[in-house]
Structures are given as C-alpha cells and as structure tokens.
Image: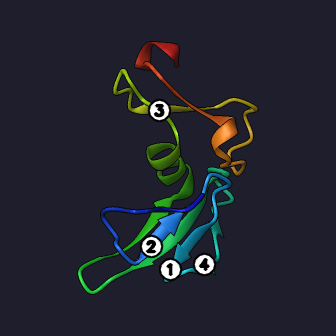
Amino acid sequence: MKKEIIEFPSYSVDEDGKVYKNDTEINHTFDKITGHVFVFIDTFVIQAYIPVYKLVAKYHLDNPNNYESILFKNSIFNDVRAENLEFVSDDYK
C-alpha cells in the first residue's frame, strides 16, 4: 500500500520500496560505494537524493521505541522492502 510522504506531498512510497510522484513510479539511483538506493526528490522548495530504505522504514514499520538506526536483516543494502528492514537501538551496531 502506498503512503504519502508527509514532507513531500506529491510523493508516496510503498512497502516494496517503490517511490511515486503523482502516482507515477520514479527510478532509483544506485550508489556503488554504499550499495544503497536513492530517489531524487524535486519540489519547488527542495531538491535532494533521499535513501529509499529510510522512507520505507519511516512509513511502513512500527517504531515504538523511537530508534533511529535501521538494520537490513539480510545484509543486502539495496533490498529496501519493509520485510527486510528493522529499527534497532544504537547498541545493536
């Protein structure tokens, strides 16, 4: 299910890591150094590359302890599906 990205109202993200602008899927950019995928957000106010895993975690995972760190359960950084992500304490690192 797509959820609107509050900071960027014309954008939404689903639990599989697909990001949409006005219901049109936008392409990811892959960073060869970190292995993470990003999307380019372009609004009248801001232009930025945002890590997709952070959007998926924020909008599709429960975080009752308000942890900031996100774990990739299978250690594959471009697998940004919600089922592969988990909020963890900084002590976990």
| Residue at mark 2 to residue at mark 1: CA–CA distance | 4 Å
The mark nearer the N terminus, 2 or 1, is: 2
Within 10 Å of the Cα at label 1, are there few (<14), some (14-19), or many (20+) other Cα atoms?
A: some
Tell me residue 1's x, y (percent).
60, 57
The residue wearing badge 4 is 26
Within 10 Å of the Cα at label 2, are there few (<14), some (14-19), or many (20+) other Cα atoms?
A: many
Q: Which mark is residue 11?
A: 2
- Rendered image quadrant of residue 4: bottom left
Q: Which mark is residue 7?
A: none
| Residue at mark 1 to residue at mark 3: CA–CA distance | 24 Å
Q: Amino acid at mark 4?
A: Ile
Which residue corresponds to the image point at 52% horizontal and 45% vertical from the top-left? 60
Secondary structure state at the residue bearing disc 3? loop
Q: Is 42 situated above or below 93?
A: below
Q: Amino acid at mark 1?
A: Lys
Q: Is 11 situated above or below 85?
A: below
Q: Which mark is residue 62?
A: 3
The mark nearer the N terminus, 2 or 3, is: 2
The mark nearer the N terminus, 2 or 4, is: 2
Q: Amino acid at mark 3?
A: Asp
Which residue corresponds to the image point at 64% horizontal and 54% vertical from the top-left? 33
Within 10 Å of the Cα at label 4, are there few (<14), some (14-19), or many (20+) other Cα atoms?
A: some
Tell me residue 62's x, y (percent).
47, 32
Which residue corresponds to the image point at 34% horizontal and 27% vertical from the top-left? 66
| Residue at mark 2 to residue at mark 3: CA–CA distance | 20 Å
| Residue at mark 2 to residue at mark 4: CA–CA distance | 10 Å
Tell me residue 58's x, y (percent).
44, 45
Secondary structure state at the residue bearing disc 1? strand
The residue wearing badge 1 is 21
| Residue at mark 3 to residue at mark 4: CA–CA distance | 25 Å
Viewer-nearest of discs 1 and 4: 1
